[in-house]
Amino acid sequence: MSVVDERLNALRGAAPRKPHNARTLAALAANPGCLRRTLLDAAGIDKGQIAQGLGVRISIGQMSSIAIARGKGFEAKVKADGCAELLRLLREHIGLPVAEVHYHDLNPADTDDRITSRLRRSRHALRVSAESNEPTGTLFDHPILQLTVNGVQVRIEPDLIAFKLGNQFFIVEVKSFAILDGTADSGKVAAAAQQSAVYVLAMREMLQTAGLDPDMVSDQVVLVCPKDFSNHPVAELLDVRKQLATLKRQLDRMESVESVLRLVPPDLSFDLRLDDAGRPTRDPQELAAAVFQVTARYSPECLGACELGGVCRSEASGMVPVLGRVVREDLGGIDSIKEAVELATGLREPDAGQQQASDLLRRAYGMREAALGAVR
């Protein structure tokens, strides 16, 4: 075991390593500048348990029974009859010339069908398809993929279909959020793109491990969603090259986590000291002091992507990051909201590095005062 591995194990304490999945890897790419998340995820620390140990309620990954049922119903509609509806979408909306398709069902065969067996079947089916010169399209329902994260093989059980046309594989991502009048919620589309990038990278790694060309997996992803308020599916192509580049950078950063470890005290530990019932016994104030020794990069989007979002929000109270990433970037060099207000109203003179942000604040404040004066 390397020195870095020993240090990461010491950070985690006696708790077992929490494995990654597609959602956690997508969240990594969504906020690549957060040292706190990078370190905790590299060590395999359960961030939900940390939040609970600090008395903060989390809601990540929790959905209403109605939303879950709607999502399952929509996916079943898209995949019914050997994915007949999906084939229609591929022909009509994407313009793919699909003449004939073979359907591979890689779902669990029974309750004893373990993930290792499904991984072997998925590898075999994808390799055979990749090596085939037949032009026939092939669909793979629920393949098991594998991705190396910080030296650990992470198995991903995606709720997706991999589709091969000619010599190209496409990821098909089925989501239950609606496309209204040709437009969908930008945050949900971004999340779908980030998660799809994880699948693209995992499929590329699987092909490369088999000695095949990883570029056979397209960076164009097929997103399938309900149209308007109906359950009628429509499809669009998403370009995930940007998300792939961000994800690769973050995974490389986790591989070089040694540089992050140099930024934290050598005796730092996030051990919750769980009792026999799995309840944390560590003093919350002591745990909070440990967590806050690692710099976070909070934005409001963290509340929907990271179990520590509520913890980091309370830490950032009164600071510019709580106003969102766009505001934080526009107000570079200004830390607190109080300082921003004082600069906007002329109560404070800007430092050398704050001049551009200060000019922006004063223009915005002047426009606000003019607008209010016009309605008085």
Image: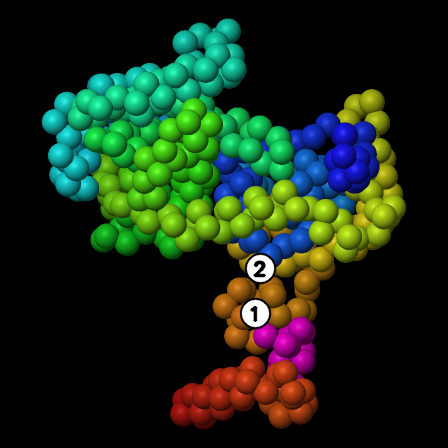
Q: Which residue is mark 2?
A: 299
- Find numbered disc 1 in the image and state the secondary structure of the residue it sits on: helix
Whether residue 103 sits left or right of residue 312 in the image: it is: left
* Relative height, residue 281 to residue 82 (above, below): below
Task: Give the distance between the C-alpha atoms of the residues marked 1 and 2, in whole angstroms.
Answer: 9 Å
State the residue at coordinates (42%, 27%). Answer: 211
- State yes or no: discs 1 and 2 in contact (Cβ < 8 Å): yes
Residue 82 on image: x %, y %: 24, 19
The kind of residue on which mark 2 rests is Ser
* Sequence-wise first label, 1 or 2: 2
Q: Quadrant of residue 128?
A: top left
Q: Which residue is mark 1?
A: 328
63, 183: nearer the viewer: 183
Residue 202 on image: x %, y %: 46, 33
The N terminus: image quadrant:
top right
1, 293: nearer the viewer: 1
Category of crowding for the residue at label 2, using alpha-carbon neighbours closer than 10 angstroms: few (below 14), some (14–19), many (at least 20): many
The kind of residue on which mark 1 rests is Arg
- Find numbered disc 2 in the image and state the secondary structure of the residue it sits on: loop
Category of crowding for the residue at label 1, using alpha-carbon neighbours closer than 10 angstroms: few (below 14), some (14–19), many (at least 20): some
Residue interval drawn in magenta: 332-342
Whether residue 43 sits left or right of residue 63 in the image: it is: right
247, 291: nearer the viewer: 247
Residue 110 on image: x %, y %: 44, 7
